[in-house]
Amino acid sequence: MDGQQINILAFGKVAEKLGQEQLQASGFDDTESLLHWLHDRYPALKQVDFSLAVDRKLVTGKTGLGRMCEVALLPPFSGG
Amino acid sequence: MTAKPIKNIFVQGSISPEFIADAIRKHAHNTGIGGHSIFLGQVRADDKPEGKVSAIDYTAYEDMALDQAHQIREEIFAKYPLTCMHIYHSIGKVPAGELSLFVFTSSVHRKAAIDACEELVERLKGELPVWGREIMGPNQYAWKENQ
């Protein structure tokens, strides 16, 4: 997909497993294909539990990704 | 519902008792208030397999956390007859014994303030994308898990 930019943000334990807090990807139409690619590229991700947010909103299941979007990998929250 | 501006809830480091005293003092002029309810979260020096917790280092997905806090605020305001509501959460390092969360609700009669405060704390802990890393020593840490 031309010009598609996915900005991936990782937090907490997920960032630790990835070894970085931010990365870029392109060419993925939905969260399922993006996750598949991430797991292939970063096998350590399988050791952590995380949920996904697309453009700051939590999503579950296969979710479409727009041309410019922000996908965040969120381990279980532990604020307070 | 009127659109309110999104408030910043994050405070760098611990929340000081003076800051809390000031927040209480600022409500003196509002003589319609009959009750305040306050929750203060304090960093516990837990004994962990890695050692005793000396501090918690908080990080957040700030943009999303502010969106979430805003939405929670609106929902709690819609549910309870509150006069006001304030939320502050630490970001960065908070030593054991110091405060990392300050939730403050006020109402004409006590029950609304008490119930809203409790619900707010539960929702904030469960829904804000914030992470605490418990620090036990120079190279020892563990990711906090909420109960």
Image (tube, rainbow, N blue to C red):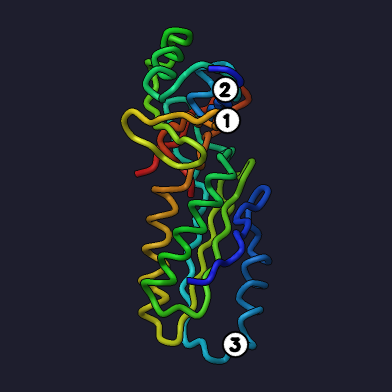
Instruction: Name the quadrant containing residue B56.
Output: top right
Foreground residue among A62 and A66: A66
Instruction: Name the quadrant containing residue B22.
Output: bottom right
- Image coordinates of residue A18 in percent, x first then y, are 53, 17
Mark 2 to mark 1: distance in Å?
6 Å
Three-letter residue code for mark 2? Gln
**Secondary-structure class at tag 2:** loop
Q: Is residue A51 visible?
A: yes
- Image coordinates of residue B141 in percent, x first then y, are 53, 27
Determine whether, in the image, residue A58 is placed left or right of residue A4. left
Residue topped by disc 2: A4
Tell me if mark 1 has few (under 14), some (14-19) or many (20+) residues whose alpha carbon lies within 10 angstroms of its own: few
Instruction: Tell me, yes or no, whether the two marked residues, 3 and 1, touch with CB atoms within 8 Å.
Output: no
Instruction: Tell me, yes or no, whether the two marked residues, 2 and 1, touch with CB atoms within 8 Å.
Output: yes
Residue topped by disc 1: A68
Residue topped by disc 3: B30
Three-letter residue code for mark 3? Asn
Outermost residue, front side: A2
Q: Please, is residue A69 above or below residue B44 in the view?
A: above
Residue A16 - label: none
Instruction: Name the quadrant containing residue A43.
Output: top left
Q: Residue at x 44, y 22 (%)?
A: A29
Q: Residue at x 50, y 60 (%)?
A: B40
